[in-house]
């Protein structure tokens, strides 16, 4: 028999990949909902950030790296740049998960917003240093704003649709460690 904790962890990892596939499929469709000049949020980064602050074992580094690398290739972005920035932000948040567990959501939102801002500035800076064509600053800033505003919605969907919630005090994580 499979351990129920391990089964749940694997199920959520597969769910993360399935959500990523759906998001990529929708973004690759030849039509857009709304104004094509208005960029949408980076749902995969938001989802990974929301999940790592609630259940770090559900989003392992290698899984997120592969998903982000896959999206870099499909969306014709510089391969590995946004993936590396996303992983750096993810690991920064993972290291602070135990500290942010008791913080109010507003503080978490500001922390994620700061990470997203640093990722966006780092991306623009690295692309500029290497003279790689990059989107206009206004578009990158607009995507940053939509991502920041979309984070609470991603958290709500993660919590109430997928059941990914913060560990309660005394609850054991996937490795048996108490919160």
Image (spheres, rainbow, N blue to C red):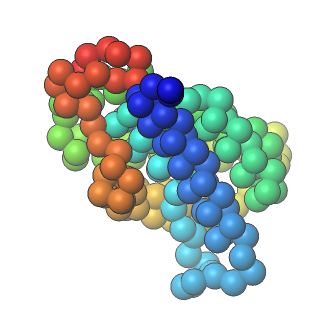
- Residue extending farthest front: 1
Residue 125 in the image, given as x and y percentages of width and height:
66, 41
Residue 32, compared with residue 86, is above or below; it is below
Quarter residue 166 falls in: top left
Residue at image coords 50%, 27%: 2
Furthest residue to the top? 177
Residue appearing at x 17%, y 25% in the figure: 169
Q: Residue 153: x percent and y percent?
A: 35, 61
User: In the depicted view, which residue is nearer to us: 158 or 44?
Assistant: 158
- The front one of 179 and 84 is 179
The quadrant of the picture occupied by the C terminus is top left
Q: Residue at x 53, y 49 (%)?
A: 15
Asked if residue 175 lies left or right of residue 136, the reply is left
6 vs 125, left or right, is left
Question: Residue 39 placed where, x, y %?
Answer: 57, 70
Whether residue 84 is visible, yes or no, is yes
- The answer to whether residue 150 is above or below residue 80 is below
Front one among 39 and 126: 39
* Res. 136 in view: no
Residue 91's place in the image compared with 69, above or below, is above
Image quadrant where residue 161 sits: bottom left
All told, the count of numbered labels is 0
Q: Who is closer to the viewer here, 4 or 29?
A: 4
Q: Position of residue 130 (x, y in %)?
A: 81, 40
Image side of residue 11 versus residue 109, left or right: right
């Amino acid at each position: 028999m499979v351990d129920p904790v391990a089964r749940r962890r694997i199920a959520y990892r597969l769910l993360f990949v399935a959500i990523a596939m759906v998001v990529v499929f929708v973004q690759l469709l030849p039509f857009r909902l709304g104004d094509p000049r208005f960029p949408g949020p980076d749902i995969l980064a938001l989802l990974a950030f929301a999940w790592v602050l609630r259940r770090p074992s559900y989003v392992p580094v290698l899984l997120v790296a592969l998903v982000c690398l896959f999206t870099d290739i499909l969306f014709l972005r510089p391969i590995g740049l946004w993936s590396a920035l996303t992983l750096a932000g993810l690991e920064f948040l993972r290291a602070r998960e135990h500290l942010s567990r008791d913080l109010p959501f507003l503080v978490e939102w500001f922390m994620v917003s700061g990470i997203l801002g640093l990722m966006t500035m780092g991306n623009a800076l690295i692309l500029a240093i290497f003279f790689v064509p990059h989107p206009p600053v206004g578009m990158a800033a607009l995507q940053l704003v939509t991502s920041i505003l979309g984070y609470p919605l991603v958290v709500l969907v993660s919590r109430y649709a997928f059941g990914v919630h913060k560990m309660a005090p005394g609850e054991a994580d996937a490795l048996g460690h108490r919160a």
